[in-house]
Image (cartoon, grey):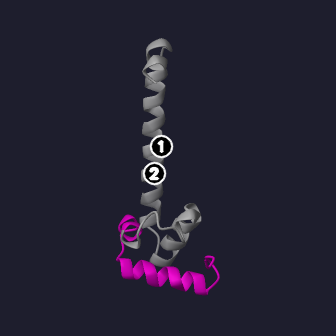
Amino acid sequence: MNYIYDNWKGMKEFAQLTVMRHEEMEKELKDKLVRLPGEQRVLEFYLEFPKLLHSKIFVDSDIASYLCMLRQTLCALRSALIAKGLLPEK
């Protein structure tokens, strides 16, 4: 990577801007999610990150923390959304 940065003028700055924009977009998404009511927040989260619904990559407490809610609340809301058919079962 350093070779590219050293030999392509402006590439390092371009990479830094790309990372900054990605971080900005992540913050905007989180800000949007936390303003939603609980059930809508959980639904939108899993619509945005569907592979996390039945994944063991992140534990419920991590997702709940990201969504600014208790783990128990996340689990209850997710179960309700699955029961309503708004989120898929395993």
Amino acid on which disc 2 is placed: Glu
Q: What's the residue at 47%, 40% (across, down)?
A: 21
Q: What stretch of residues is rendered in magenta?
A: 62-90
Q: What's the residue at 56%, 81% (across, down)?
A: 81
Q: Residue furthest front?
A: 56
Q: Helix, strand or loop at disc 2?
A: helix
Q: Disc number at residue 22?
A: 1
Q: What's the residue at 41%, 72% (across, down)?
A: 60
Let me know if residue 73 is in the magenta part: yes
Q: Nearer the viewer, residue 47 or 24?
A: 47
> Mark 1 packing: few (<14 Cα in 10 Å), some, or many (20+)?
few
Main SS of the magenta part reads helix
> Mark 2 packing: few (<14 Cα in 10 Å), some, or many (20+)?
few
Q: Quadrant of the C terminus?
A: bottom right
7 displayed left or right of 69:
right
Residues at marks 1 and 2, CA–CA distance in whole angstroms = 6 Å
Q: Which residue is mark 2?
A: 26
For residue 2, above or below residue 66: above
Amino acid on which disc 1 is placed: His
Q: Position of residue 58 (x, y in %)?
A: 43, 65
Q: Disc number at residue 86?
A: none
Q: Helix, strand or loop at disc 1?
A: helix
Q: Position of residue 34 (x, y in %)?
A: 42, 66
Q: Are the two marked residues, 1 and 2, in contact with CB atoms closer than 8 angstroms?
A: yes
Image-quadrant location for residue 82: bottom right
Q: Nearer the viewer, residue 37 or 49?
A: 49
Q: Position of residue 74 (x, y in %)?
A: 43, 77
Q: What's the residue at 45%, 32% (across, down)?
A: 17
For residue 90, above or below residue 16: below
